[in-house]
Image: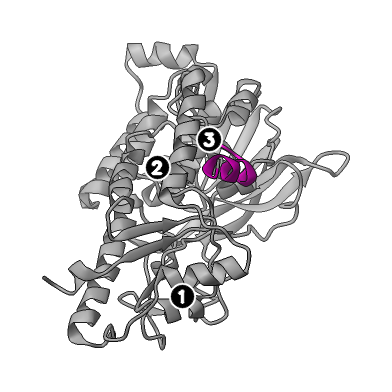
Amino acid sequence: CTQASRQHVDIYERLPVPFGLVRFGVAPDHPEVKNVMNTFTQTAQHARCSFHGNVSVGKDVTVQELQEAYHAVVLSYGAEGNRTLGVPGEDLAGVHSAKDFVGWYNGLPTNRDLRPDLRCETAVILGQGNVALDVARILLSPVDILKNTDITQPALDTLAESSVRRVLIVGRRGPLQLACTIKELREMVNLPGTRPEMEASDFECIAKMLKVLPRPRKRLTELLLKVAVETPEETELERRNSAKRAWGFRFFRSPVEILPSDDLTRAAGIRLAVNRLEGEGEDVWAVTTGEVEDVECGLVISSIGYKSLPIDPAVPFDPRKHIIPNTMGRVQKCAGLYCSGWVKRGPTGVIATTMNDSFDTARTLLHDMDEGTLDISTVKPGSAGVTTILEKRGVKPVLFSDWEKIDSEESKRGEARGKPREKLLDVGEMLKVAWT
């Protein structure tokens, strides 16, 4: 029997519901990605694992109090902050972060009142990663596809009335720096009722570079070239000609200003700087040429990245890198404190990347136990000690059995609409269902 096999793990979560980014970040039309929730559920139902929702670490209980109750504390709270554009007009109505927009259609309680105005023909998305393509796909997908997913009903109703017919996905660098994966690009290419609209000039000399590209980048670029510059076969041409909606990448462009409407209250367009690239290979950067172009649009969504935020004054935090300073997951100068995921290494990678990163932190923790650098010889109260603190502060945790009541209610509401689930959007309603 190893030391690890005798340990108990408690999970603390601010919301009453588990699964975090899988529930609130994964696109509703990607149900296969959400299957990882089954593995999470098996873990949460393990005899030596407990879930404590509705507990805000850093507010309801401090990290220091957790350290007094446990031999080791792992911080895995991700990156909930938005990177700002830093341009005039980004506070106008009609300008949203991708994080908030995704939270809106995925049912994140803090974004339930976003109410994006989709009464415009053109939307511009700044950024060309997978999240940007998720947003573009949701904006352009036929409602008949979305209505069979777990997208929230308010979002579905808004999208059903949407006037958006064209989505431009803007990036400061070129096709060889496109940040999405081939799966997401292929989904855009095959999206029913849409056609691609690209600028052929953006792809000059790209074909000549194919032979020196690593295989994943080569496959992505080949698909991009096929869509952007090759003459489509007859069936594809007919499909494109009948399409009522369009999407396209715009490369070598950076936002300069969000242009206001005549009454100065909302976005009516965006001014983009025209860039050129300097450097070679992977190490290239965008430099402005002095030229600008204006694009009419009523919706601007910024998908330029996330950033982690400090959770507790007692935890070291790098305000420049927006991560917790660490060595292989060990928080620097804080014995018994660890971190994993985006707060450990920055907001990059997909779910599998983050899972593997968490495995690395777990291996570090187990190594420290075996080596004795993590002292587990003393008796710690664990959740019993934290529960006492929370009771004094009037905080009642949601246990996994409570979450299962929420899960059952959401599934029942979804079944009534022909959907896998209809998420509860209000924390108060979640708690009422959990504790009834």
Q: Is residue 2 above or below residue 305?
A: below
- The disc, 2 or 1, on the residue closer to the chain's N-terminal end is 1
Q: What is the spatial separation of the Cα atoms under label 2 and label 1, in whole angstroms?
A: 57 Å
- Residue 204: which numbered mark, if any? 2
Contact flag, marks 1 and 3 (Cβ < 8 Å) = no
Quarter of the image for residue 149 reads top left
Residue 195 vertical position relative to residue 70 in the rendered view, above or below: above
Residue type highlighted by circle 2: Glu
Image height check: is 175 above or below 296?
below
Q: Which mark is residue 247?
A: none
**Label 1 residue SS:** helix
Q: Is the image coloured rainbow, by chain, by secondary structure, or in one colour?
A: one colour
Please name the residue shown 64% across and 45% down the image: 428
Q: Nearer the viewer, mark 1 or mark 3?
A: 1
Residue neighbourhood size for the residue with mark 3, other residues' Cα within 10 Å, grouped as few (<14), some (14–19), many (≥20): many
The question of residue 406 being in magenta is answered with no
Residue that label 1 marks: 66
Task: Give the quarter of the figure containing the C terminus.
Answer: top right
